Amino acid sequence: MKTLLIIDDEFSLVESLTELLSWEGYEVVTAANGRQGLEQLERSSPALVLLDYMMPVMDGMQVLRSLRSNPAYRDLPVVLMTAAPMGLPPHEKGWTALLRKPFTAADVLRVIERLLGDSRGDIDRSG
Amino acid sequence: MSDSPPEKPDDLNTPETLPALPPRVPTGLPGLDRILGGGLFQAGIYLIAGPPGSGKTILANQLCFYHVAAGGRAMYITLLAESHARMLGHLQTFSFFSADAVGQTLKYINGFKAIENEGLAGLLQLLRGAVREHRATLLVLDGMMTASVLARSGTDYKKFINELQTWAGMYGCTVLFLTSADLDGAGQPEHTMVDGICELGLERLDMKTMRKLTVHKFRGSGFAEGGHTYVITRDGLVIYPRLESLPLSQLPERANGKRLGTGIAALDRLMGGGLAYSSTTLFLGSSGSGKTIFGLHFLAAGAQAGEPGLLFGFFENPAEVIHKANRLGLGLDTLCERGDVTILWQPAAEQLLDALGERLLRTVRERGIKRLFIDGLVGFKEADHSGRLAGYFAVLAAELAVLGVTTIITEETRELFVREIQVPTPGVSAIFQNIIFFRQVEVEAELLRLLSVMKTRDSAHARALYQFDITDHGIEIGLPFQPSRNVLTGVSQLLAEGPPMSTGGKHEGER
């Protein structure tokens, strides 16, 4: 079972994503701000991070800088989620994919599947 | 560990694009869609509030059946409302009901056990599963009062709504909350959190009940404010947007000085060449003074000129009107059969002001009407219970002008012999570009018919009183009435011998 890390201060979105991704067969761990997110990253070794752009304590760009400075996480897929209408950071800042809020369940699953290959957790949903 | 840069950014959402408004979800009720500017927004949460009997359940089911008929999927969840069996039994009487959809694209489930056993968390879990598994694009939660009562705290209730909102957004599912709670209750969390609030209300007016829909809030676009009347029919709720709250369709066509013949050449001459294109004219006079006959000539003349006409009447039924017109040789039966003239009769029953306007404008648009004869203003006046008539008619006249319709409206004076000339309906005279006054006077024990052009806009007009007769061949207008005393009292005394009646003589307006 692949582990996904959600770092977002928006409680209802974290709850909904957790529900959705658990249903899809992923193990989900969460953090409510950037600092907790980096701590959770060390503990859970996720296959992919869903990272909010605007957060208290450490925002998404600070997390990205810290994360990419560590060679262990240089290739870790990071999906940056943002509701900001403009002024988004350029791709060079280290995010792998961008999801503009609000997004649909289909949007987020499509991005995750693309970044993680064809695996969707370990649940066989063919039946 | 690789030195390669991160993957190319996903093209699903590029930073250059601003988030667009979600698409609209038509409600299937044309009146409501007009009020909302095109329907609800996908994935929005809307509160429908109203007392028992106001039609919330009918409205929500109407939306569900329309939604699934249009290809969507809907889920109706009840919380201590009436049982599904009873509800479906009642719904079968409506034309929108489709037995084929029930249990397939439209499902009904009861959420009370979930909320009773596990609180709002249990209900949320049920709703999430319903949306995901049924792939619902419309979700109705009937009985929100139960949910708010069973919530442990206000925060719990807010959290429930917030999480449902996020979940609905992720699945593009539009949500309707139905509640019979009073909207006046301050601090109800759902009022601030939902994307829109629509209230259904009942208002007692003497012996009758008026139903009124009011949109209090609608995120994402403007909406027609204020109250809008509705009725519950076999087709469900039929909503009539308040005419004054709607924008005009487009800019008016340019008239370019075009004038329309009334079908009575002598009257056209008195008015400087006929009625101005897309103008509104008032025929004011007592009962029996000839107003309707002049209006019928106007429609018949339009038919000959290829201008479709509409008689929107309140008094005489179509058979009576046709009989009257045919006696004058106007052949109205043939004109109606050919579709050159349409008669819409409003029987003497309780009418809704906005329903009248909707029926009138819809017919005008559908049939490309260019000449309209409304007989008479009092029919609208009797349907007005809120003192709206002046504003209503200003908008109606403007909309008709936009549609290139030239209109004549009759209004009866209260007395047969008028002493004081004034438009009986307060506030409406300003909307009429032309006013023609019909009166009867007694001269030497004989009743004579007279008319005078009191007002024309953009043209000179004759100012004298003219005698006219209604003959088997139609209207005959004579020379100016002889100077006399006391005409306005209705009992006139001749000062000198007058000339004989003539329809071909020179008139004051032509000099």
Image (cartoon, rainbow, N blue to C red):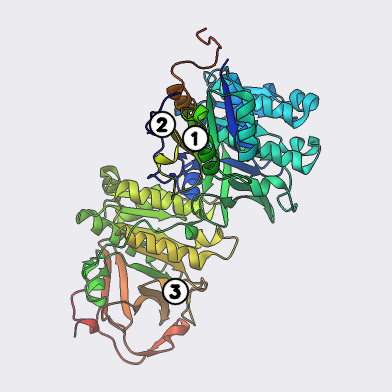
Instruction: Indicate the quadrant where residue B338 lies.
Output: top left
Badge 3 amino acid: Ser
Please say whether residue B76 is visible from this viewpoint. Answer: no
From mark 2 to mark 3, how far is it between C-alphas?
Answer: 74 Å
Against B22, is B450 above or below?
A: below
Instruction: Please check whether the numbered discs 2 and 3 fall on a single chain.
Output: yes
Circle 3 is placed at which residue position?
Answer: B429
The mark lying in front, picked from 3 and 1, is 1
The mark lying in front, picked from 2 and 3, is 2
From mark 3 to mark 1, how far is it between C-alphas?
Answer: 77 Å
**Callout 2: residue from which chain?**
B
Residue placed at 37% from the left, 74% from the top? B435
From mark 1 to mark 2, how far is it between C-alphas?
Answer: 10 Å
Instruction: Residue B6: give its label.
Output: 2
Against B161, is B107 above or below?
A: above
Closest to the observer: B356 or B13?
B13
Circle 1 is placed at which residue position?
Answer: A68
